[in-house]
Amino acid sequence: MTPGSNLDQDRLRRHHRLMWRIRAFEEQALKGLDDKLVLGAIHPSIGQEAVASGVTAHLTRQDILLSTHRGHGHTLGKGADSAAMMRELLGREGGNCGGKGGSMHIADFSVGMLGANGVVAANIVIAAGAAHAIKLKREPHLVCCLFGDGAINRGPFLEGLNWAAVFHLPVLFVCEDNGYAATTRTKTMTAGGGASARARSFGIPAVEVDGNDVLAVDAAAADLTQAIRAGGGPRFLHARTYRLTGHTGSDPAAYRPADEVAARRREEPIGRAAELLRDAGVTPDALQGDQSEAVAEMLAAYRAAVDAPFPSAAQAFTDVQDAGDPRMEAF
């Protein structure tokens, strides 16, 4: 963790609050799954909160974010409303996507969240396309695309990074490396030097960082986004972290050794941030207050979502593309 002598206490405290908000949201989302009010899968990011907090701290509202199936934390960090997100998970009216997207497909254009994606690595080429649009329009924004370590073994990873490098696009690629691609240990099926080495092979500068050290992620993201905004082209951040749960809310993760999980639990990012804050003089009551406020916020969001109505049947016919001519002659 970053030395305490150079600690920006206010900044770390903001990270501490956001990380607790992310964890509390995930815990309520898992409760929704247990209560059978969330249909489909929930992919919790418990243990990975530092990546979301450290990276999104350097994104403006106008910057674009592309996320993954494990994207609740990224979406909260970008500024999406937690109550609307919870309604979306429960398929209720007032959700970010009207209750149609659910956990893996939340989008909120009002805060620059272009969407989560349930197709591994698909967001990488979408990010390149969005960054190309920004460049063509000469806008002063960037695109941030987060994906897991499993995505680097899929074709869109190669296509997206190549596209970004060839056209010198304003995009930050972030590999949120938790060591497992679903239920498989990633290193057992990944050749070569891994994510950073592959990025560098395209000529994209890459930085590796301890993804459980929120200040280290923050500092790396600061340098990379500054370089992108200065016209430096794409950059790559490889953040090594660890999810403390299974791949989904219903996955017991029996494929992971118990001692491995226990050791990584001692390195989780919220506890590490809290330790630094205590050393800097923040009282235990204040730190407990951050947690309590986050839990209260997400509990209220969950209860409001449970009480919210389902969308009307007529809403099934909205947001449907009807441009173009469907006649057979068009083909």
Image (tube, rainbow, N blue to C red):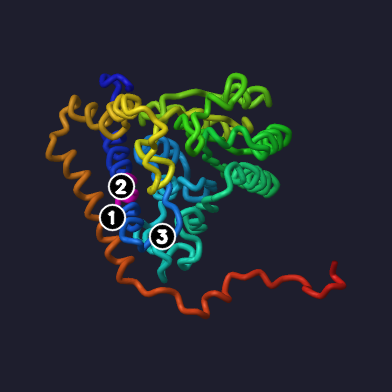
**Quadrant in which the N terminus appears:** top left
Residue identifier under label 2: 21
Q: Indicate the position of residue 28 as horizontal and vertical percent values.
A: 30, 53
CA neighbours of label 2 inside 10 A, class few (<14), some (14 to 19), many (20+): many
Looking at the rendered structure, the kind of residue marked 2 is: Arg
In front: 73, or 26?
26
Residue range corresponding to the magenta coloring: 22-27
Residue corresponding to mark 3: 89
In what element is the residue under mark 3? helix
Sequence-first tag of 2 and 3:
2
Identify which residue is drawn at 28% across, 35% down: 270
Reply yes or no: does residue 26 show up in magenta: yes
Element carrying mark 2: helix
Q: Report the disc number at residue 131.
A: none
For the residues labelled 2 and 1, the Cα–Cα distance comes to 7 Å
Counting other residues with Cα less than 10 Å from the Cα at mark 1, is it few (<14), some (14-19), or many (20 or more)?
Answer: many
Residue that label 1 marks: 298
Q: Nearer the viewer, mark 1 or mark 3?
A: 3
